[in-house]
Amino acid sequence: MIFSSKLIEDAVQEFSRLPGIGKKTALRMVLQLLSMDKPEVDEFTGAVSRMRHGVKFCKECHNVSDSDICVICVNPGRNRRQVCVVESLRDVIAVESTGQYAGLYHVLGGILSPLDGVGPEQLNITSLCERVKNNEVTELIMALSPTIEGDTTVYYIARQVKELPVTITTIARGIAFGGELEYADEMTLAKSIAKRLPIENYVTMK
Protein backbone atom coordinates (compact mmCIF):
# COMPACT_ATOMS: atom_id res chain seq x y z
CA MET A 1 0.00 0.00 0.00
CA ILE A 2 1.13 3.51 -0.78
CA PHE A 3 0.00 6.22 1.66
CA SER A 4 0.01 9.95 1.19
CA SER A 5 0.18 10.40 4.96
CA LYS A 6 2.82 8.93 7.22
CA LEU A 7 0.44 9.34 10.16
CA ILE A 8 -2.20 7.16 8.48
CA GLU A 9 0.45 4.64 7.47
CA ASP A 10 1.64 4.37 11.07
CA ALA A 11 -1.94 3.95 12.34
CA VAL A 12 -2.64 1.20 9.78
CA GLN A 13 0.56 -0.54 10.79
CA GLU A 14 -0.47 -0.54 14.46
CA PHE A 15 -4.00 -1.83 13.78
CA SER A 16 -2.65 -4.60 11.55
CA ARG A 17 -0.67 -5.95 14.52
CA LEU A 18 -3.95 -7.14 16.06
CA PRO A 19 -4.82 -10.84 15.51
CA GLY A 20 -6.90 -11.44 12.40
CA ILE A 21 -6.53 -7.86 11.16
CA GLY A 22 -4.92 -7.49 7.74
CA LYS A 23 -3.71 -4.26 6.14
CA LYS A 24 -6.99 -3.69 4.23
CA THR A 25 -9.14 -4.16 7.32
CA ALA A 26 -6.76 -1.96 9.31
CA LEU A 27 -7.06 0.74 6.66
CA ARG A 28 -10.87 0.63 6.88
CA MET A 29 -10.66 1.05 10.65
CA VAL A 30 -8.29 3.98 10.36
CA LEU A 31 -10.44 5.69 7.72
CA GLN A 32 -13.49 5.18 9.96
CA LEU A 33 -11.67 6.89 12.83
CA LEU A 34 -10.66 9.67 10.47
CA SER A 35 -14.32 10.28 9.62
CA MET A 36 -15.33 10.52 13.28
CA ASP A 37 -15.38 13.72 15.32
CA LYS A 38 -12.18 14.33 17.26
CA PRO A 39 -13.89 14.04 20.71
CA GLU A 40 -15.22 10.62 19.69
CA VAL A 41 -11.76 9.48 18.65
CA ASP A 42 -10.32 10.82 21.90
CA GLU A 43 -12.89 8.82 23.87
CA PHE A 44 -12.07 5.70 21.85
CA THR A 45 -8.33 5.94 22.33
CA GLY A 46 -8.80 7.03 25.93
CA ALA A 47 -10.87 3.93 26.71
CA VAL A 48 -8.18 1.68 25.24
CA SER A 49 -5.46 3.48 27.17
CA ARG A 50 -7.40 3.38 30.45
CA MET A 51 -8.08 -0.31 29.95
CA ARG A 52 -4.45 -1.17 29.34
CA HIS A 53 -3.08 0.91 32.21
CA GLY A 54 -5.86 0.31 34.72
CA VAL A 55 -6.90 -3.31 34.36
CA LYS A 56 -5.72 -5.66 37.10
CA PHE A 57 -5.74 -9.39 37.69
CA CYS A 58 -7.80 -10.71 40.59
CA LYS A 59 -5.63 -11.85 43.47
CA GLU A 60 -8.00 -14.74 44.10
CA CYS A 61 -8.79 -16.23 40.70
CA HIS A 62 -6.51 -14.33 38.26
CA ASN A 63 -9.45 -13.10 36.21
CA VAL A 64 -9.31 -9.54 34.84
CA SER A 65 -10.63 -6.95 37.25
CA ASP A 66 -10.87 -3.23 37.92
CA SER A 67 -9.84 -3.84 41.53
CA ASP A 68 -7.72 -6.27 43.53
CA ILE A 69 -10.58 -8.77 43.77
CA CYS A 70 -12.91 -9.30 40.78
CA VAL A 71 -16.70 -8.85 40.88
CA ILE A 72 -17.26 -12.61 40.61
CA CYS A 73 -15.13 -13.43 43.66
CA VAL A 74 -16.80 -10.77 45.82
CA ASN A 75 -20.32 -11.68 44.74
CA PRO A 76 -22.05 -13.19 47.82
CA GLY A 77 -24.47 -15.01 45.55
CA ARG A 78 -21.79 -17.25 44.05
CA ASN A 79 -21.27 -20.79 45.31
CA ARG A 80 -17.88 -20.59 47.00
CA ARG A 81 -17.60 -24.35 47.30
CA GLN A 82 -17.26 -24.78 43.53
CA VAL A 83 -14.25 -23.56 41.54
CA CYS A 84 -14.27 -23.87 37.77
CA VAL A 85 -10.69 -24.20 36.51
CA VAL A 86 -10.16 -22.67 33.06
CA GLU A 87 -7.24 -21.98 30.78
CA SER A 88 -7.80 -18.34 29.87
CA LEU A 89 -9.85 -15.21 30.45
CA ARG A 90 -11.83 -15.96 27.30
CA ASP A 91 -12.97 -19.24 28.83
CA VAL A 92 -14.42 -17.39 31.83
CA ILE A 93 -16.48 -15.31 29.40
CA ALA A 94 -17.53 -18.45 27.51
CA VAL A 95 -18.73 -20.24 30.66
CA GLU A 96 -20.44 -17.14 32.07
CA SER A 97 -22.30 -16.69 28.78
CA THR A 98 -24.07 -20.02 29.32
CA GLY A 99 -25.78 -18.71 32.45
CA GLN A 100 -25.54 -22.24 33.91
CA TYR A 101 -22.72 -21.79 36.41
CA ALA A 102 -22.87 -19.91 39.69
CA GLY A 103 -19.60 -20.85 41.37
CA LEU A 104 -16.15 -19.26 41.31
CA TYR A 105 -13.30 -19.53 38.82
CA HIS A 106 -9.57 -20.06 38.67
CA VAL A 107 -7.68 -18.94 35.56
CA LEU A 108 -4.54 -21.01 35.00
CA GLY A 109 -3.11 -18.71 32.34
CA GLY A 110 -2.49 -21.62 29.96
CA ILE A 111 -2.06 -25.37 30.01
CA LEU A 112 0.94 -27.62 30.44
CA SER A 113 2.94 -27.96 27.23
CA PRO A 114 6.53 -29.11 27.75
CA LEU A 115 7.32 -28.80 24.04
CA ASP A 116 6.44 -25.11 24.24
CA GLY A 117 8.32 -24.63 27.49
CA VAL A 118 5.16 -24.26 29.58
CA GLY A 119 5.57 -26.06 32.89
CA PRO A 120 3.73 -25.85 36.25
CA GLU A 121 5.85 -22.85 37.25
CA GLN A 122 4.44 -20.79 34.39
CA LEU A 123 0.82 -21.46 35.39
CA ASN A 124 -1.36 -20.45 38.35
CA ILE A 125 -1.41 -23.95 39.80
CA THR A 126 0.23 -23.27 43.16
CA SER A 127 -2.34 -20.60 43.99
CA LEU A 128 -5.12 -23.02 43.02
CA CYS A 129 -3.81 -25.62 45.45
CA GLU A 130 -3.62 -22.95 48.14
CA ARG A 131 -7.25 -22.02 47.54
CA VAL A 132 -8.27 -25.63 48.02
CA LYS A 133 -6.24 -25.88 51.22
CA ASN A 134 -7.35 -22.59 52.76
CA ASN A 135 -10.97 -22.36 51.65
CA GLU A 136 -14.03 -24.56 51.86
CA VAL A 137 -13.76 -25.70 48.24
CA THR A 138 -15.48 -29.05 47.79
CA GLU A 139 -15.38 -29.35 43.99
CA LEU A 140 -12.93 -28.43 41.26
CA ILE A 141 -14.60 -28.40 37.85
CA MET A 142 -11.95 -28.89 35.19
CA ALA A 143 -13.23 -26.90 32.20
CA LEU A 144 -10.11 -27.22 30.08
CA SER A 145 -10.04 -27.77 26.33
CA PRO A 146 -10.26 -31.52 25.62
CA THR A 147 -6.79 -31.94 24.16
CA ILE A 148 -3.79 -34.01 25.19
CA GLU A 149 -2.29 -30.91 26.84
CA GLY A 150 -5.57 -30.19 28.60
CA ASP A 151 -5.86 -33.72 29.94
CA THR A 152 -2.22 -33.63 31.06
CA THR A 153 -2.94 -30.46 33.02
CA VAL A 154 -6.02 -32.02 34.63
CA TYR A 155 -3.96 -35.06 35.62
CA TYR A 156 -1.20 -32.91 37.11
CA ILE A 157 -3.59 -30.80 39.19
CA ALA A 158 -5.44 -33.90 40.38
CA ARG A 159 -2.15 -35.33 41.61
CA GLN A 160 -1.37 -32.12 43.51
CA VAL A 161 -4.64 -32.13 45.46
CA LYS A 162 -5.28 -35.87 45.75
CA GLU A 163 -4.73 -35.81 49.55
CA LEU A 164 -7.22 -32.99 50.05
CA PRO A 165 -10.97 -33.43 50.63
CA VAL A 166 -12.06 -32.10 47.25
CA THR A 167 -14.00 -33.73 44.41
CA ILE A 168 -12.58 -33.24 40.93
CA THR A 169 -14.94 -33.32 37.97
CA THR A 170 -14.53 -32.46 34.32
CA ILE A 171 -17.03 -31.10 31.84
CA ALA A 172 -18.85 -33.75 29.82
CA ARG A 173 -17.34 -34.47 26.42
CA GLY A 174 -20.08 -32.81 24.43
CA ILE A 175 -17.05 -30.86 23.23
CA ALA A 176 -15.07 -32.88 20.71
CA PHE A 177 -11.63 -34.11 21.72
CA GLY A 178 -9.02 -31.76 20.28
CA GLY A 179 -11.46 -28.85 20.22
CA GLU A 180 -11.01 -25.45 21.82
CA LEU A 181 -13.35 -24.47 24.65
CA GLU A 182 -13.77 -20.86 23.55
CA TYR A 183 -15.18 -21.96 20.15
CA ALA A 184 -17.88 -24.21 21.59
CA ASP A 185 -21.45 -22.93 21.22
CA GLU A 186 -23.17 -21.82 24.41
CA MET A 187 -25.70 -24.68 24.48
CA THR A 188 -23.03 -27.37 24.13
CA LEU A 189 -20.87 -25.74 26.79
CA ALA A 190 -23.82 -25.30 29.15
CA LYS A 191 -24.76 -28.98 28.86
CA SER A 192 -21.12 -30.01 29.34
CA ILE A 193 -20.97 -28.12 32.62
CA ALA A 194 -24.37 -29.34 33.83
CA LYS A 195 -23.47 -32.98 33.03
CA ARG A 196 -19.90 -32.89 34.32
CA LEU A 197 -18.43 -36.24 35.31
CA PRO A 198 -15.88 -37.50 37.85
CA ILE A 199 -12.32 -37.11 36.65
CA GLU A 200 -11.79 -40.87 36.96
CA ASN A 201 -13.92 -41.28 33.83
CA TYR A 202 -11.11 -39.77 31.77
CA VAL A 203 -7.92 -39.93 33.79
CA THR A 204 -6.52 -42.96 35.60
CA MET A 205 -5.16 -41.89 38.98
CA LYS A 206 -2.28 -43.84 40.45
Image (spheres, rainbow, N blue to C red):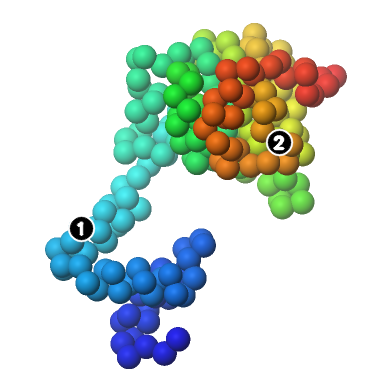
Residues packed near mark 1 inside 10 Å, few (<14), some (14 to 19) or many (20 plus): few
* Residue at the image point whose x is 71% and y is 51% from the top: 117
Question: Residue 39 at what x, y percent from top left?
Answer: 14, 63
The quadrant of the rendering that contains the N terminus is bottom left
Kindly indicate whether the residue at mark 1 contacts the one at mark 2 (C-beta within 8 angstroms).
Answer: no
Kindly report the distance in space between the C-alpha atoms of the residues bearing marks 2 and 1: 42 Å
| Marker disc for residue 152 | none
Quarter where residue 147 is shown: top right
Q: Is residue 67 left or right of residue 144?
A: left
* Residue at the image point whose x is 51% and y is 12% from the top: 81
Residue 123 appears in the figure:
no
Residue 201 appears in the figure:
yes
Q: Secondary structure at mark 1?
A: helix
Q: Is residue 103 left or right of residue 87?
A: left
Residue behind mark 2? 176
Q: Is residue 47 left or right of residue 196?
A: left
From the viewer's side, name the closer residue of 87 and 99: 99
Q: Secondary structure at mark 2?
A: loop
Amino acid bearing label 2: Ala
Quarter where residue 112 is shown: top right
Tell me if residue 76 comes above or below residue 66 in the rendering. Answer: above
* Residue at the image point whose x is 29% and y is 57% from the top: 49
Question: Residue 51 at what x, y percent from top left?
Answer: 32, 50
From the viewer's side, name the closer residue of 69 and 45: 45
Residue behind mark 1? 43
